[in-house]
Amino acid sequence: EADIYQTPRYLVIGTGKKITLECSQTMGHDKMYWYQQDPGMELHLIHYSYGVNSTEKGDLSSESTVSRIRTEHFPLTLESARPSHTSQYLCATRGAATNEKLFFGSGTQLSVL
Amino acid sequence: GENVEQHPSTLSVQEGDSAVIKCTYSDSASNYFPWYKQELGKGPQLIIDIRSNVGEKKDQRIAVTLNKTAKHFSLHITETQPEDSAVYFCAAGGNTGGFKTIFGAGTRLFVKA
């Protein structure tokens, strides 16, 4: 099983602050993903990466940015947080084959006041 | 665009009864259909998956059926237990879009003791 870690688990910050949500994995998976989950449960893909130095925007427009300098690390950054960014953020990985399952982290619950 | 519809959004059953969740997908190129279970405070976890060359798959109390002609697939949980209470997501994936997975909107299952 893949080990995927997200920190912090919960974050409450004020409007205008810069934040970085961390996501790390130990399985050497090339593909990594960030999903935003709203209170209505739906999962929205906001960013993904095929591997080092690869980043792509997902289906849902997001003001966040990501980087992939190392295989195991895929941080998400918000330059200036707003209340509309309040949400659950889930990081996931996938192995080399096309149709392999996604491994999800436990998520970061972000609240912007 | 690609779409996965999931019904019902909420399902309440008595312990011991069966639960059925249904999904339809739009992209005929999809060939991988996973189901994820998300418990409170955790990320989604794969519980069963089916590939397009198979019509049915079973794992203990859970089973999935696939009708490729109709683009329908369903999750069946028999002899439900309180620990089955969670949010369930169906999804469709394939060789398109950089191995992206398209998720349904989720079903919140309540199993009453």
Image (spheres, helix red, strand yellow):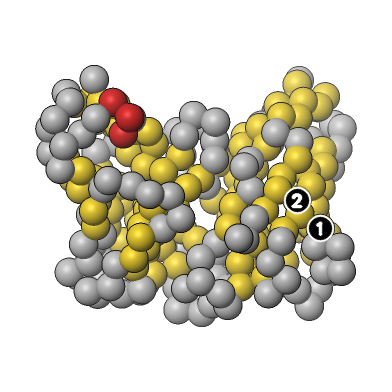
B90 versus A41 height, above or below? below
Callout 1: SS: strand
- Mark 2, residues whose alpha carbon is within 10 Å: few (<14), some, or many (≥20)? many
B95 versus B46 height, above or below? below
Residue A75 point in image, percent of width and height? 23, 54
Q: Amino acid at mark 2?
A: Cys
Callout 2: SS: strand
Q: Quadrant of residue B77?
A: top right
Residue B81 point in image, percent of width and height? 74, 32
Q: Which numbered dot is residue B23?
A: 2
Q: Which numbered dot is residue B72?
A: 1
Chain hosting mark 2: B
- Mark 1, residues whose alpha carbon is within 10 Å: few (<14), some, or many (≥20)? some
Residue B13 point in image, percent of width and height? 81, 27
**CA gap, disc 2 and disc 1:** 6 Å
Image side of residue B56 versus residue A86, left or right: right
Q: Which residue appears at 46% of the width and 55% of the height? A: A59
Q: Which residue appears at 80% of the width and 52% of the height? A: B74
Chain hosting mark 1: B
| Sooner in the amino-acid sequence: mark 2 or mark 1 | 2
Most foreground residue, B74 or B1: B1
Q: Quadrant of residue A20?
A: top left
Question: Can residue A52 be seen here?
Answer: yes
Most foreground residue, A12 or A7: A12
Q: Amino acid at mark 1?
A: His
Question: Can residue A104 be seen here?
Answer: no
Q: Which residue appears at 87% of the width and 32% of the height? A: B17
Image side of residue B56 versus residue A79, left or right: right
Proximity of marks 2 and 1: CB atoms separated by less than 8 Å: yes
Q: Which numbered dot is residue A105?
A: none
Most foreground residue, A43 or A82: A82
